[in-house]
Each structure stands twice: as structure tokens, then as C-alpha cells.
Image (cartoon, rainbow, N blue to C red):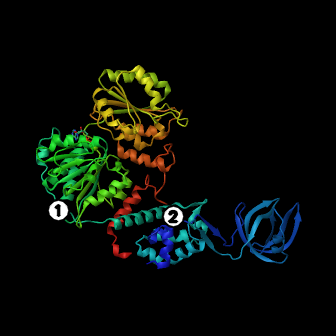
Amino acid sequence: MFEPHDIKLLKKLKKRTLLDLALIAPTSYEDTTLSSQIEEGKTLTARAVVKGSRIFNGRLYVELFLSDFNRTATAIFFKTTPYHKQLFSIGSEHVISGRAGYFRGSLQISQPKSLKSYGEITPKYKTVLKQSEIRALIAKYVTKENLIKAALKPNEIEAVLKLHFPKSISEVKQDGEFKEEIIQALKSAEAFNHLYKMRKKRTFTPAIKPLNGSIEPFLKDLPFTLTQDQLNAIEDIKKDLSSTKKAAKRIIIGDVGSGKTMVILAAAMIAGKDKSVLMAPTSLLANQLFEEAQKFVSKHLKLALVTQKNSQGDYKEADFIIGTHALLYKDDLPKAALIMIDEQHRFGANQRAMLDAMLKQEGRGAHFLQFSATPIPRTQAMIESELIDISTIKMLPFKKQITTAIIGRSEFNKLLEHIKAEIAQNRQVLIVYPLVEPSSEVPYMSLLEAKKYWQKNFKNVYVTHGKDDEKDSVLLEFRDKGDILLATTVIEVGISLPRLTTIVIVGAERFGLATLHQLRGRVGRQGLESFCYLYTNAKTPPKRLQEFSNTLDGFKIAMLDLKYRNSGDLLDGTIQSGKAFKWLDLSEDEEIIKEAKERIKKFTFAAV
Ligand code: ADP
Ligand code: MG
């Protein structure tokens, strides 16, 4: 649809589709239409004839006759320049535009411009292109006809056309803001455009082979029954893997402790002798997954472990190979029909690229399943499901009993009592500090400063942090022998610590809700009554901490996180507040996205 020259301009704008272009918003409008009335404080645009002029106190006063209003007015220029005197010579005719006001009952216009042309509303855009270029581009392509072809609804088309070609400012704006009906229509158009692009991007690769191994032998021996959500996820996977037409591409999202490992093992059973590979972000996790596989599926599948330090079994012979990214560097790894990664958000772009290569096999693709412990907001899931299938696990096998409380310095003694009581019951405490070393910018104790205090007053205190090389062994030793663990957020993807019942997060307001949620997910994993203390020096703790305290549901917290991120209430500089959408707000526009999704399903792609 676009001409070659215009495609270059679109590239500069980083836009691809007609709707990308159509949804660019003017930052302001220049309005040179003649005013129909004179309003104090507003811009007046009117035809005028100069009747006289004088200089007084260094100012230039020009007497005007406004023919359309049949009255006189005085234009004031605060600096007298020869240019102005010349321009407004007696008898000259103008269309002036300036702010109208009254002084002792007479009409005054301050510093008016003399317009070269009038009768137009010109949108001003802030883009990399020149005003004339972007305006021409929009005028050429953003037409009613093209918008109809792009499958917009009538109200959306109307809003887009008003946005760029308003007949009056009041058509698009009210009190200086875009009108609500315009915004709603543009949100809807933006959602539709985004989903359309996502859907077009999704590619399907034929699968290497369909996988139909039985999971019954595995289920039969489990010491517990799977939750409905676990079963649903397994059902989704079963359907995916039984296809030859397309290789599975699915992400299974479930909070920490929701039992994703069981789903992983079930998938490995379905792959059976056609082989599966599971990659984990750390050797600790790989080892833990290997142990679970040994426990639950070793009767049915030949297992192997591949990490840098520790390997077990013969991976060339194994049905189910578990490892770290060390797997990516083995060139004699057997071809597997199913590839899975656990804790997918922990993998870097580099590793993903290597993984992509591993998935492809002569024009066909291995089935690919990803597992993530980072719940995403519903709205985001609705959007991303255009690119990848999503299963969510919301139920937890154990009902979590975690009491969350915001505390401050005055509650410190009570906290100590609580910690002592927990330790006396053979339970463990984790205290998370915002920093390893002291910093003048952070008004909290650092890990290293706090260490002295805890080691002096308590026994079995362990310390670790992200840059600690001994992290893994410290964690393992703490699991078995420790009472108190002092750490930074490293613990975020640590091992499971069944006796851990209390977590104290120092400087909680400094962390994003997603991080707090991950941290809190460390306690109460086995259903023991647990506690999460959000320690803050803030006199009035931020509202988001309060809301966080009221729910344990990761998907709800993801929504909250979004809401507070958009509203700018975020002290945690690590999370970018960059908004992906111009009009749409993922924290509140669920209905709009739902509607756009319905529409996109019916939309035939030949149309554009
Ligand atoms: P995730 O990987 O989702 O964080 P895990 O798979 O590690 O969670 O499971 C957490 C714990 O719950 C493990 O000890 C696991 O054996 C146990 N578990 C998993 N599913 C169930 C279930 N349906 N009933 C009881 N316990 C379960
Ligand atoms: Mg897991």
C-alpha cells in the first residue's frame, strides 16, 4: 500500500502499518479558524484593520477595528520594534490571533500574530520527520477508505479522522485534553492493530513427530493427586504434543510452589523414548529437578544430568536429559523431540538464540515448552497469547498461610521475639537486605553491617548474596543446619527451603511488587503458617505495599504492579516504567483488549 519513498519515511518513524501511522497523535493544533465569539482569556482570531498606533512607556499600542464583531480593540506589543511598526501601518488589513482580555472595559489583545493564511486547523506532530513530511504522509494514507480496509469500526475511523483533520478543536479536545470518546476509540484501534501485528508475526513450524506417550504409570505412583490446574496444563500439553502439523510453543506460568515440576515430568513422559531435554538456569535447580525426576519417573525413563561440574548417567543414551546451559555446548547431544526450559525468564538473549538453533531440525521443529514463575497480568496474557500459547497454574497444592505485615523500627523488638519463637520451633528465618555494602544513598543497613549484629545475638547465621561464589553451598548448608539466612534478593530463584517460615524484607518500599512477591513465595512452601514482614522507615508506607499485603495471588499482584507502574508510584528504579502503548493502558483496558481479540479472530488477513 505504501510507496517506496514513503516506506523510507515510515522506517524513520519506526512504524509499519497504516494503523501505526494513523495512531500517532498530534501534540498540539494550530488553529487559524476565525473566532465566532470573543472569550476572555482565550485566543481570538479575527480580521482587523489598523486605525492608528502609538508608543507609550516603551510599548506599542495598535488600534484595530474588528469588522466581523463591529468593534474596536487594542493590540499591545510589549517591545516596540521597527518591524511591528511597519507591519501594522495605518490602513493595513490583517487576520490577527492573540489572547483576548479586557482592561477597564475595553478589549485588548496581547502580542497578536498577523497570520499569513487562516481558516485551518493544523496538527503539530513531534516525530523525527519534518512537520510538512509527516502531515503529507498522514494526509495521503490516513483516509476513510484505507481505514475501512484496515477493518476499523466506524467509531474508530471517525476518531482517527478527527484526530488528524478536526473541523474544530472542540471536536477532539475538551479543557485541553483529548475527549474521552476519542481516547476510547483510539485505544480500541490500537489494541486491534497490536493484536493484528502479533498474529501475523506468529509462525508455525511442523513438528518432528507427534508424541503420545502415556502418563498413567507416572500419575499412578504419585504420593498426591495433582491439582486441577496442573491437570489442565498437562492436558494442554498433551494436545500440543500430539500434533505433527505444528511444533508446540507454549509457556506454562505458575507461581512459585504451584507444582510446575510435575507438569514438566508429565511432559517428559509424553515424549518418552522420543527424548526430551530440560534446561534450568542454575546447576542447583538442575540438580533439584534431576532428583525429582529420579524420584518420580526413573522407573519409566532413562535419565541423565548435564552441568558444568556434575554429570550423571549417559546423556547419549538417556530419554530425559536434564541440565544447565552447559547443554547448549554439547555437540553430541541426541536430537530430542521435546525441549523444555524451566524458569525461562532467567535465560539471557544469547542462550535463547542458541536454544532456537537447537529447536530446529531440518525444517521441522522440536516441541517447545517454557515454564515461568512470573505471573503476568491478564491483559498482557491476552496479548501475548497471540504469539505463544499460555497455560496458567493458579492453584497451589498447599493452601498458603502467609501473614504479611508492614513494620518499622518501633516493632523491631517484637520482630526479635517472633524470630526467637520460630527458631525454637525448628523453623527458619530469611532476612533480605537491599544492599551488600553500605551506601550513603540507601537509608538502611547493608548486609555486611547487619551481619555483625545477627551473628553476635544468634547462632547458625548464614550469609550470602548474588556475587557470592559459594552461594549454592551456603544455601544447601543453611537448608540443613541454619536458623537465620541473611541475603540480598539472590534468594529469588533459590532452592526450596521447607522449614523457612519467616521472611523479613528490609527497605521493602525499594522493591517492585513482582520482586516482593517472588521473595514472599519463599516461605510457607509446605503449608506451614508463615510470615512476611515488610520493613520500612517510611512514615507513611506506600499504598502499593498495603495492597500487596492483602493478597497472595501472583496474577493479581501482576495487575497491581502494572497499575502502580503506570501511575508512576514506583521507587524501584530497576523496573522501567516505559509504556508500550500510546493509548492503551494494560492496567484498566481489559474489556477493550477482549473485544479486539474477538474481532481479530473474525478478521480475514487478505484485507490489508
Ligand atoms: P514450582 O516449580 O511451581 O515452584 P514445584 O514443582 O517445585 O513448584 O513444587 C513445589 C512442591 O510442591 C514440591 O515439593 C512438589 O513435590 C509439591 N507438589 C507439587 N504438586 C503437588 C500436588 N498436587 N500435591 C501436593 N504436593 C505437590
Ligand atoms: Mg520450579
Is residue 593 found left or right of 354 in the rendered image?
Answer: right
Residue drawn 51% across the image and 64% down it:
182
Crowding near the residue tagged with mark 2, few <14, some 14–19, many ≥20 C-alpha atoms within 10 Å = many
For residue 30, which quarter of the picture? bottom right
Q: Which residue is mark 2?
A: 182
Kind of residue at disc 2: Ile
Q: Is residue 401 visible?
A: no
As displayed, is residue 394 above or below residue 211? above
User: Residue 164, position in %: x, y?
Assistant: 55, 70
Q: Quadrant of residue 418?
A: top left
Counting other residues with Cα less than 10 Å from the Cα at mark 1, is it few (<14), some (14-19), or many (20 or more)?
A: many
Instruction: State whether residue 511 appears in this view.
Output: yes
Q: Nearer the viewer, residue 296 or 73?
A: 296
**Residue 240, percent from left and from top:** 21, 58
Q: Quadrant of ligand 2?
A: top left
325 on left or right of 440 = left
**Residue at 36% in and 55% down:** 350
Q: Is residue 375 above or below residue 594?
A: above
Q: In the rendering, at what x and y percent does residue 379 appear?
A: 38, 54
At mark 2, the secondary structure is helix
Q: Residue furthest bottom?
A: 3
Foreground residue among 444 and 455: 455
The reply, left or right, for residue 250 in relation to residue 313 is right
Q: Where is residue 91 shown, x and y percent of the image?
A: 83, 78
Which residue is nearer to you in this view: 188 or 507?
A: 507
Q: Which mark is residue 209?
A: 1
Q: In the rendered view, does 447 fall on the left or right side of 38?
A: left
Q: Give the numbered dot on residue 591.
A: none
For the residues labelled 2 and 1, the Cα–Cα distance comes to 50 Å
